[in-house]
Amino acid sequence: MTDTILRLVKDTTGSDATSPPDTVEAAVVEAVTEQLAEPVEGVIVDSPQVTADTSTWIGQRRAYLADAPPVLAPWLRNARDLAEHTRWTASYLGHVSAFHTVRAPLYVVRLIGRSPRGAWRLTVRWVRWVCDTEARPVETAAATTADVEAWLSLSREKSRRVRPRRITSAVVAAPTAIGATVAGFLLPAWELGAATGLALALLGVAGRRQDKPVITRYVSVHLQRPLNSREITDALDAIGIKGTPQFVNPIQVDGPGWLAEMDLPRGVLAEKLLDKRKELAGAMRRPLQCVWPSVGTEHPSRANLWVAKTDPRTIKRVWPLAHDGQADMYGEFPFGVTPRGETVPLSLIGTNVLMGGVMGSGKTSAVLVIALAGALDPTCEMWVYELKGSGDLDSVEPICHRYVSGDDDEQCKATLDGMRALEREMKRRKKAVADLPVEDVPNGRKVTRALSDKYPHLRLHPLLAIFDEVHTLFEHPEYGKPAAEVAGRLIRKARAYGMELIFTTQKPDADSIPKMVSDNAIVRFCLAITGHIPNDLILGTGMYKRGIRANIFEPAEGSDPKDSGTGWLARSAMNARIVRAYYIAQELARAIGQRGLALRIAAGTLTGEAAGQVIEPVDVETVVDHLRAIWPDGATAVHSHRLVEALVAYRPELYGPWISTDPTLTDREIQAASSATLSAALRPYKVATAQITIRDCCGGAKGVRWTDIPEAATDPEDDDE
Ligand SMILES: Nc1ncnc2c1ncn2[C@@H]1O[C@H](COP(=O)(O)OP(=O)(O)OP(=O)(O)O)[C@@H](O)[C@H]1O
């Protein structure tokens, strides 16, 4: 069968199909051979067989017509297709011409290099021709048998043939030699050189070798073979899945690839294919990035295998907002592409994101896409904490309300302060939204773009807070615990108020990511990880069992990105898909950051550090902390009015208003009023005030007992929720 195909290919392409297999023809032959291979037993899935009655003349003509190609190729009948084909052919020919023109000097050098071989070949041929060596075996035979008559006749015949050959040789050789000698004296050097080069090149043509073509051939290694059932069955067998799979549908083209849906042999779970993706790709002799098995929905042994036609690594995908356009952080922006090449948008409003993956899995690159989308929304306030300290997010620094980069104590403390400040901002927004009339929030008390635009003074614009490599903070001996508490509250509530939180970690384990954070993440992006525990920590419990497994991805290795940037983007098991985040090189990221800065300057929305302000850490101490700070050593109880006076002296800006300055009130009335204020302030912390008699002081009055003051008071608002 291969011979037939070789002949067909030769006929069709006009080329020598017997040449070595590094040619395009050989690739075609291989592909066609594979396709025409006998189908595996069972359901026919590769190509429908024509089973027609060919015993009658009509039957034969019908069978012929069924397979007959259209009179005119479809692309010839459609003006747009014709134009497209013409354009493509012109660009193809242009490319091929340019390719070989650039290499023409190299071809000449190669030919000259082969000229001695060519000269030798021609000389040998010429000598054989002149001496008529083909007749020699016959002459020898006549001489050995002593057949004089035959020998004489042969000899005469030879002289008759050889004489004109000698004359012809002399006629050609003498003028050629004379012409060459004269030219050597008369011609200018460059003409002589060119003529010699040409002569040598011609000799080189005669000296060409089959195994080393003079012309550089280009063979596309990225062109994949069509997928067929035999390849799949053989590959399954090679990776230890014995038995024949049942193909439930014909293998078909699905986007830029082929899709095979099959029931694996009984007793084999489809998830086995996920665990063995690398081995499967090896057995199929295809690049890893082209082979994407997944678990079907019908039953646990149903597997879908999607195979890309072209290696995705060779397709350059540019982020659609890279060179122009703006993003809306209350809407969606392009985040990545699926292996099939479909763009995947990401909407962050009302959500938060948890991203995880081992080193080199592409977290920073993925988070950079989100950061740059935030940069391109001039209304978005950005708080970026890059705790790796690599400067990978520096491109957005000029527009950030708050930007911290580093992994030391100082940066960890600044990040904790940032989380507290965000919590305070969240409470401010919550209060602002709570006071709005119900008509403005018909779908619940949540912030929307419409609300933000309608009430600009409430400052409900989108706020994007990124905590890259956040495990650095959560593992910190001093700041880790309070940070986990604040982050837990933020991740539960902030999303309702237009605050979008992004956490990334390269250490997805229980110590590095607080449970509250991993339990309450909504959008999860899990890049290459190892094992099912980190998988479920990032993607949610039970995802590994359902076949949503990020251990199928390979992190970058050296300069090979492998599956870097590729991960499961999931909201739930039913809403999970494999996505490769757009890759934005640092130089381009800086240009996008500059564009974001220009947009903010034009819109007048620069705030915080970007606007030259100094960000003060948030004061998180409460009145209870202040009471403990001013409490007299050893005292078991103190009257409230005394405590208020001390508080005013300690923090006048905060407690000054607690002492009335009304001139119509008596001292006693002023004391009673300040005592009442303290009681009200302590009530949310569940610290009671009572009538206490202190002899050294002023007898009986409202006061506080030391034993009633808790060691660490939590903000009452935090308890509420
Ligand atoms: N989407 C992508 N497409 C192509 N290549 C990518 C993509 N994302 C990352 N890479 C490549 O992988 C390398 C590692 O990516 P990146 O630094 O984002 O990983 P990381 O998970 O943040 O690593 P680490 O934890 O060591 O900081 C990059 O230098 C880049 O070459």
Image: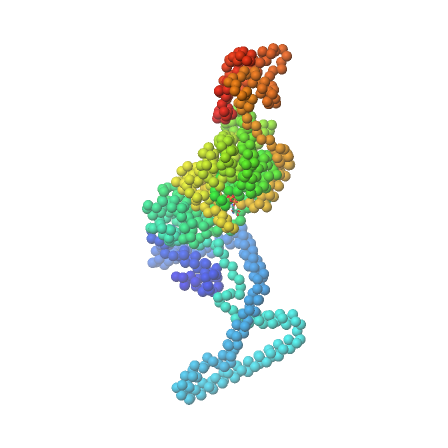
Q: Along the line of sight, which residue is nearer the eye, 339 or 77?
A: 339
| Residue 516 vertical position relative to residue 281 in the rendered view, above or below | above
In the picture as drawn, the residue positioned furthest to the bottom comes out as 148
Where's the N terminus, which quadrant? bottom left
| Residue 31 vertical position relative to residue 202 in the rendered view, above or below | above
Q: Along the line of sight, which residue is nearer the eye, 357 or 435?
A: 357
Q: In the image, is 676 to the left or to the right of 30?
A: right
Q: For the image shown, how many numbered marks are present on the structure?
A: 0
Q: In the image, is 265 to the left or to the right of 548?
A: left
| Residue 173 vertical position relative to residue 437 in the rendered view, above or below | below
- Residue 669, position as x, y percentages in the image: 58, 11
Q: Along the line of sight, which residue is nearer the eye, 583 or 328?
A: 583
Task: Write the residue at 34% across / 58% down.
Answer: 55
Residue 597 visible in image? yes
Residue 44 visible in image? no
- Residue 463, position as x, y percentages in the image: 56, 33
Q: How is the image coloured?
A: rainbow
Task: Write the residue at 47% across / 61% down.
Answer: 22
| Residue 105 vertical position relative to residue 673 in the rendered view, above or below | below
- Residue 268, position as x, y percentages in the image: 34, 46
Task: Write the residue at 42% across / 86% down.
Answer: 143
- Residue 155, position as x, y percentages in the image: 46, 86
Task: Write the residue at 52% across / 75% down.
Answer: 120
